[in-house]
Amino acid sequence: MSYRHNDSGRLIDRSQTLTFTFDGKTFTGHPGDTLASALLAGDRMLVGRSFKYHRPRGIVASGVEEPNALVNMGHGNRMEPNQRATTTELFDGLTAVSQNRWPTLDSDIGAMNAAIARFLPAGFYYKTFLWPRAFWKNVYEPFIRQSAGLGRAPTEADPDSYEHFHVHTDVLVVGGGVAGLAAAKAAAATGLKVLVLEQTHYWGGRTPVDGGKIDGMPAQEWIDATVAELEAMRNVTLRTRTMGAGVYDHGYALGYERLTDHAPDAEGPRHRLWRIRARQIVTATGAIERPLAFAGNDVPGVMLASAMRDYLVNWGVVPGQRIVVATNNDDGYRTAIVLKKAGLDVLRILDAREAGGGALMQEARDLGLRIDCGRGIGKVSGGKRVKKVQICVTTGTGGAMEALDCDAVAMAGGWSPVVHLWSHCGGKLVWDDAQAHFRPDPAKAPTGADGLPFVTTAGSASGPMALGSVLQDGAAAGTRAAKAAGGKGRAPKVPVAEDVEEAAMLPVWQMPARAEYRLKSKSWLDFQNDVKVSDVELAAREGFESVEHTKRYTTLGMATDQGKLSNINGLAVLAGALQKPIPQVGTTTFRPPYTPISIGAIGGSARGDIFQPVRMTPMHAWHDVHGADWEPVGQWRRPYAYPQQGEKVEEAVQREVTNTRDNVGLLDASTLGKILVRGPDAGRFLDMLYTNMMSTLKVGRCRYGLMCSENGFLIDDGVVARVGEDAWLCHTTTGGADRIHAHMEEWLQTEWWDWKVHVANLTEQYAQIAVVGPKARQLLESLGGMDLSAETLPFMAWADGELGGIGVRVYRISFSGELSFEIAVRAGQGLALWEKLVEAGKAFGVMPYGTEALHIMRAEKGFIMIGDETDGTVIPQDLGLDWAISKKKTDYLGKRAQERSHMTDPTRWKLVGLETEDGSVLPDGAYAVGRGKNANGQLVTQGRVTSSYHSPTLGRGIAMGLVLHGPDRMGEVLEFPGTDDKVYRAKIVNPVFFDPEGAKQNV
Amino acid sequence: MLILTCPYCGVAADETELTPGGEAHLTREAPGSDDAAFEAYLFQRENPKGVHFERWRHSYGCGKWFHAARCTQTLQVYGTYPAQTSAPPQAICDKISGARPGWSWRLFG
């Protein structure tokens, strides 16, 4: 059984007891416990199920590398899946439930997958769900979806708050172990700004567990003294519970601080994302121990040797009382010694090396431990916990020499530096034969804007594992980073520790070396995703020779732990199968974040109302008070319609159209872009931007214009007014204002930079109100102040003046086919004018109308809308707008492109009107089908609907669409299959449905 | 996230302050150009592992377009310069030659 053993446990406070539940059962722990240590203390060995075979899974590690102990934390709106028990600090009232099991963790139906594991090899999905095709949608997809994903996603909105910090520092040290502290001390001595991030809540890393003396003091004393010294320095910032998540271009790094995960009742944000710019980054990220690949290495109770040591020293917890230690290096002895000294029964140390180890082996022997050299584990037996170990010859095929009854196994496979942060931004690795690991290659560091390295590694992250060399390397890294960041001054004394002599380790990638298939197929590499030695070998046999391909084929390292335990073992097995040296196989790519970070932290405070600022016109509040049903248009909100009491939105739209056509309507057109183009070359510039001629426009007049991209496609349209000899005001679409302004700037700055033109985006400087309908002139005249007669202000003219005492510019333009005036007024006067119009308009039956009424009225007139009739593949010629394309101009943006053969192809679909035979509304976006089928067996298409509405004016559905040879096929009936399985029939007609002579607007 | 210094306002700007504009020093092909030249102007782009010349706009700053000479491999920035030119400044070319002797990019190098 696993239990709280003795009085040890340097991180816990035994004077206080905390209560928590796991799968509904109540457990206790102490402040300082992790969920993992507290579960072990409560004899909860089985904590989860593996992804594919639903194998019983226990805690195997003690830190971020843990692949198995993933739980669903909390409930309701604070529920969160896949939380790692080994990095979850215990608090009172914590609730956790296990994942990937049904109905319970102990009796899980999915576990029958394990029984048929022989038939679920690597690539199972790729091989199995192929045929018959008819099964794809209704049989295979539901099955795959059912088994996809680990844990359940929360369904409620997250109530916690999150924030971002933006920080600049000279030196960033990631990792608060002894190497990180030594580096920070060395860098801080130069007076530079130093930021130190440590992912756990304590300093010193694993050194206090591993033991040793630094500068003659016990390690913990040195750590405490150093932290105190750093805390006292004004140029140093220290943060615990903050993980270095990623390193990016030019010294950018992300830190992930967990502020209240351990104290959920505390005030303030839950997580904080540190967005750091550092001149130099020191990665003192430590090392992670590797498991050994022997059969049954996934049975709960088999643990990394270092983790077993951690649980005992840090939390006073042991996973069993009768323990077998398997190792291929001297470090495994440290665990055996610690266990023995704590009074536990270490049954046997199995050292894979024929010659055994060095001083630590001697120490173990002196303690009376039995050591078998050249021996390893052939197989671990047990279901939900370890029962028995079979001992074999390391070099053999796995024949059992002896069996030992035991309840826990410690495995020590050697250490791999944590190279993630080094690698994120391009740092390269080199294979270290002596330690059988990849370590950073200092000659190939990530480089910054100056072309020089900006990341340096410290301590065991560099490769050396012994305390003395770790400290030396750490201090040197700090000094190096400070110097590169411009620091001056003498480096402090390098801390010293005496190292025990260690014997060489022996790489063991499969234990025993010539294991039979039955053993290899039970030797786990990736515990979470169920990838075994046999799977990687199968992948190699099937031709997945690249490590990146093998990864994806087998899912090795693709679990939430991202292969922190499995990576090196997996690629070593692959190298073995391919009979290539390991460095030739290489590693997969390391990508940020180092461990998963919360979506909340990424979003920070940018959520809800402040996710994106809403742009408001001066009349926004009036619309809101008057019941506007809002529609987002770009970053604006525009009234879609103004439903009255008891009125549906659709009914309001119809009423607004009818009232505007019969009386007078008001539209807030302030969102339309208004860009002033001015200068001696302004006319020439606009002639290049628009397809038609703008330079010939007379002052006082307006002209409708089209803008195309250099690729020929229509990108925007609007009315241009010449407001002076050298000045034009260009109206753009609401969504296009910023884009078109940028488009103008780009061409002016990068192509025609010698042209004397400047542009200014005045969109927000003016409010604009469209007064539309047969009574529009009467309404405006009732305000008084200027002559708006047809003689003085004809269609497509503008004039400055005054209305109701407010200075205005009136454009007589129409997007509805009605008599229409668009009145521009300084933004600050917008609401005042609007209210005057509403008040004075009562006598004329004025009503505001929204964007949908606007859309219907323009469609009734056959006017195109950017984004409806255009979609980035449409040219003006498709829309029958040839009249707006100048034949005289030798050049404009898009002209050359429109000369290409496919742009002049007579089979391009062209704009027409569409009328259903029964007056119903065509589905927007529906395709007109023709006779015959294409190569994919689909009906051939010959057109599509681009806009479709119910027209209250005509009392029927109207639509516009692009149709093959459309204008030549007037009267022909097309069939449009809907997604509702109905087929809609519509006749091709002229796109101008209403008042084609323009009698209403020209009065 | 890159840092590029805007040659107009002098701000060392984070990439999030900038808008990328693709390859620099393109020559516009007007009506009358042949199809191959127009296609190359519109679509064909360098994709070097090494020295590259790019257009950037300081969108959330002074709004100016500028060019950057940088290495796509080492992320070294050789320099930034105003967009109102059809060739990189000699000083920047010299700096590139110092870091990468024998470099070439389109007609430059």
Image (cartoon, coloured by chain):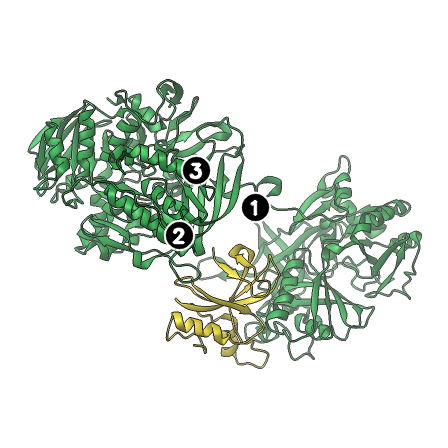
Q: Chain of mark 1?
A: A
In the visual, does A180 lie left or right of A1000?
Answer: left
Q: Residues within 10 Å of mark 3 (few under 14, many from 20)?
A: few
Query: What amino acid is at disc 2?
Result: Gly
Q: Which chain is yellow?
A: B
The answer to whether tags 1 and 2 share a subunit is: yes
Indicate which label's residue lies in the foreground, 2 or 3: 2
Q: CA distance from mark 2 to mark 3?
A: 20 Å
Q: Which residue is mark 2?
A: A489
Per the model, the C-alpha gap separating discs 1 and 2 is 77 Å
Secondary structure of residue under mark 1: loop
- Which chain is home to disc 2? A
- Of tags 1 and 2, the one toward the viewer is 2
Hey, what amino acid is under mark 1? Asp
- Chain on which label 3 sits: A
Asked if residue A219 shows in the view, the reply is: yes
Residue hosting label 1: A980
Q: Residues within 10 Å of mark 2 (few under 14, many from 20)?
A: few
Q: Nearer the viewer, residue A995 or A268?
A: A268
Q: Quadrant of the C terminus of chain A?
A: bottom right
Residue A160 rendering spot, x and y as whole percentages: 53, 33
Whether residue A702 is situated above or below residue A280 in the rendered picture? below
**Residue at 18%, 50% in the rendered image:** A434
Contact (Cβ within 8 Å) of mark 2 with mark 3: no
Circle number at residue B90:
none
Q: Which residue is mark 3?
A: A231
Where residue A764 appears, as percent x and y from the top left, is 73, 54
